[in-house]
Image: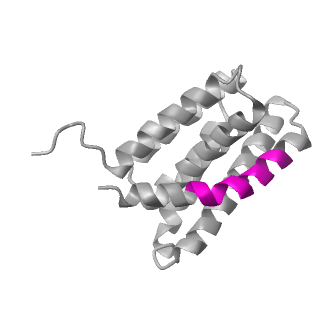
Amino acid sequence: MQSILHLNSFKIYNLLLFLFFSIIVNSNSLPFMFYYFFYITFHFLLIYISIYHYSKFLFLIFFFYGLSLDIFLLNEIGPHLIVFISLLFFLNVSLKYFYNLTPKKIYILILILQLLMIFFEFSSSSLLYNSFFEINFILKIFLLSIIFSLPIFLVFSKIDNFK
């Protein structure tokens, strides 16, 4: 009989999501590079688990994180929640096409989805709430996403092999 504390990769990812979420919303004293790293990793992990560990339970998890990020970061409800749930609907329809992809192609897919996801979050918050986002900020996020994503992908691949 397995104990409740037995950690599989899905439980580890959920713990990491909660840790990264906590750091993102309480990042007042973090240097900007660490904030960007955790923000990027959080989004990358959301996409990673939605591809490799898809289940209907993820709708509840994405709803919680989308709503919470909107409330804590924007004091409004909308952009994160809309983008997170839309991503899951998209992946629900298209996951059957991803089964034959190589890890390299899945990595590129995750990176593209992450960049689109962040772009849609910023553009929808701009449209919904007339908030202004600096192009410098989004360019830094995109550049750092490209730099950090491969090591993050490799670490997550190792976690998936963890028994």
Is 17 a magenta residue?
Answer: no
| Magenta range | 139-152
The colour scheme used to paint the residues is one colour
The residue that appears at 31% across and 49% down in the rendered structure is 8
State the image coordinates of residue 129 (x, y, percent, origin top left).
80, 29
Residue 64 appears in the picture as rendered: no
Taking depth in this image into account, of 102 and 147 the one nearest to the observer is 147
Please report the residue visible at 90 percent of the width from the left and 38 percent of the height from the top.
134
Point out residue 160 in the picture as x, y percentages from the top left corner.
Answer: 40, 58
Residue at point 63%, 25% (across, down):
25
Q: On screen, 106 above or below 123?
A: below
Quadrant placement of the C terminus: bottom left
Judge from the rendering whether residue 9 lies leftward or rightward of residue 107; answer left or right: left
* Residue 143 point in image, percent of width and height: 80, 53
Magenta stretch: dominant SS? helix
Q: Position of residue 127 (x, y in %)?
A: 82, 38
**Does residue 116 sit above or below 135 in this rendering?**
below
Quarter containing the N terminus = top left
Say left or right for 77 vs 98.
right
Outermost residue, left direction? Answer: 1
Based on the displayed image, in which of its 4 quarters is residue 57 positioned? Answer: top left
User: Visible in this render: residue 7?
Assistant: yes
Q: Residue at x 39, y 50 (%)?
A: 56
Q: Dividing the picture into quarters, in which one does residue 82 lie?
A: top right
Instruction: State how many labels appear.
Output: 0
Q: Is residue 144 magenta?
A: yes
Q: Residue 144 versus residue 133: which sits nearer the camera?
A: 144
